[in-house]
Image: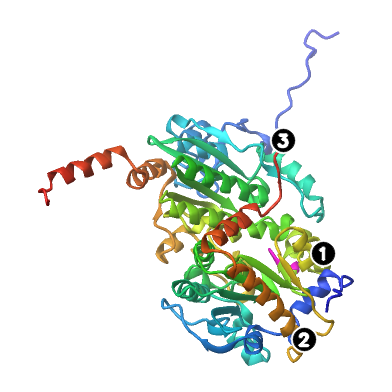
Amino acid sequence: METMNTEITPIERVGLARHPQRPYTLDIIKNLFEDFVELHGDRRYADDPALVGGTATYHGLPVVVIGHQKGRDVNERRYRNFGMPKPEGYRKALRLMMMADKFNRPVITFIDTPGAYPGVDAEERGQAEAIAFNLREISKIKAPLITCVVGEGGSGGALAIGICDGLLMLENAVYSVISPEGCAAILWKSPTQSALAASRLKLTAFDLEGLGVVDVIIGESSENRVNDSEIYQAIDKQVHAMLLSLLGLSDAERRVLRFQRMRRLGEWSQSGI
Amino acid sequence: MSLFSRKKKNLEAVPAAERRVTTEGIFVKCPKCSTALFKRELEENFQVCHSCAHHFRLDARSRLAMLYDEGEYEELDAEVISCDPLGFVDTKPYPERLEQARRVSGLPEAIINGRGQVGGHLVFAGAMDFSFMGGSMGSAVGEKIARIIDRAIEYRGAVITFAASGGARMQEGTLSLMQMAKVCAGLAQLDEAKLPFISVLTDPTTGGVTASFASIGDVIIAEPKALIGFAGPRVIEQTIREKLPEDFQTSEFLMAHGMVDLVIDRRELRAMIINLLNFMMPSENILRLLDEDKEALPDTQ
């Protein structure tokens, strides 16, 4: 557990992050949380099964827990839309976070999505607006926010529930601005270059820790499968530690740190041309 | 030696296909209606076709000049430029692409920041330029937007952005993605400071820029017939395996679906922005009127 495997190539990690036997949000909720009540709907249009959330108890503390949800068999995959939320999913997530804020409860989110759904209906209902609105409004929430990337962190569709005070990432999860396949198709004009794209995009937990994006990497044993209790213990240990450290800060302190954290992100030059 | 011998060579007839008057640099053909447009007149008309009102893409500095009073503004943050945090190489190294983009566009970065007056109001504006790597948002673009927001809060000004972008800059990977969070967090603080943000969407605005600051203006204005969307049309076609309707992801489509406030001809844009700023910006005139109203109230004590 403590010895992380740095030998795995980035494209292999992409494969692991997408593995159908990887624990999904509802598996994690079942193993880490008690009294989970799934709450539904965005109060605007629909309920989105690709993004689930509700109230739960975590180590005795009432929290809101939210995450992308994929399916395992063909029917469930289709029902969950392969974990690709539509605008109503993001609006539901924000609604639940605002409720957490009202009752001053922490929010824990789990990221595992190929991306926001690219479809006609999603565009019609404002996919971009739903994501952008979340980015702005979640950053205003006073309650502690913890995000854990457990599988695929697919661009804006992942980030839309990923504004947080502490970002955790599983060792074999990935978090990227575009899929390696999409990047290869655009920059190399060849889908066969996706392994190369995966390594160039610096999408692994180790890369992102180095870039100041990820705060904590959660180590995995080689075979982390849905029935493997080790992975849940590992997630629990780090999420709980992060939660305790955030609860040790006042709302005002957390707010300052959160805005500083986001303001710092990125690397640029000051030298002009 | 003959008296009538030719000393000069025969004039060669120019083949009909090559016979033309040189008008390069004087006329521009409208890509929509094919009308030949006198270049200077096109510039005077805000790069809008006289005949069919097609809006040509505009460079960032012309954009700012059209916005500010008397076309005067101070350019800010020109020293903030992209570096290569990932050491990214695709078919070319990223620094080479940056160099090429600077040469082609004549700009230091895909966005130009300005400070000046618009209708007498203090405005910090950022205009994106599609000719610089497709107007993509990397760390430098995110930082520049964050800086105009910071300054607007400090000096109590308004923020106006002109989006023209293919989305996040892939060559900076997840750091580009994080710029979406960074600028939206800035806008959250602008909200709390009760200061205005007007977002203008121009052709094209897609991807990570649409899914961040561009879609959350207090007022969102789109230029006519611009391509605006989250996912690119090709990606959607591949996902749903159908041909998309003609007007899909145009300004007018977004207007019909409630995603933008106004679709406005570029020639009327500045006047509209001033109108909106008059509503949004704190003004001594309004405070005086409110005071007069208070005085007019009967004394309650």
Query: Which of the 4 quarters of the picture holds residue B257?
Result: bottom left
* Crowd rating for badge 1 (residues with CA inside 10 Å; few <14, some 14–19, many 20+): some
Q: Is residue B8 above or below residue B149?
A: above
The quarter of the picture where the N terminus of chain A appears is: bottom right
Q: Which residue is mark 1?
A: A199
**Residues at badges 1 and 3 in contact (C-beta under 8 Å)?**
no
Q: Which residues are magenta?
A: A176-180
- The residue lying toward the viewer, choosing from B263 and B36, is B263
Q: Position of residue B87 (x, y in %)?
A: 81, 53
Q: Are marks 2 and 1 in contact (CB under 8 Å)?
A: no
In the current view of this chain or complex, which residue is farthest to the left? B298
- Lateral position of residue A95 relative to residue B233, left or right: left
Quarter of the C terminus of chain A within the rendering: top right
Q: Which residue is mark 2?
A: A230
Q: Are marks 2 and 1 on the same chain?
A: yes
The front one of A259 and A17 is A259
The answer to whether residue B211 shows anywhere in this view is no
- Can you see residue B165? yes
For label 3, the crowd category at 10 Å Cα-Cα, with few meaning under 14, some 14 to 19 and many 20 or more, is: few
Label 3 marks which chain's residue?
A
Task: Tell me if mark 2 has few (under 14), some (14-19) or many (20+) residues whose alpha carbon lies within 10 angstroms of its own.
Answer: some
Magenta-colored segment: predominant secondary structure: loop
What amino acid is at disc 3?
Answer: Ile
The alpha-carbon separation of the residues under discs 2 and 3 comes to 52 Å
Q: Which residue is mark 3?
A: A273
- The amino acid beneath tag 1 is Ser
Q: Which amino acid type is shown beneath numbered disc 2?
A: Glu
How far is the residue under mark 2 from the one under mark 1?
Answer: 28 Å
Q: Is residue B137 above or below residue A18?
A: above
Question: Under tag 2, what secondary structure?
Answer: helix
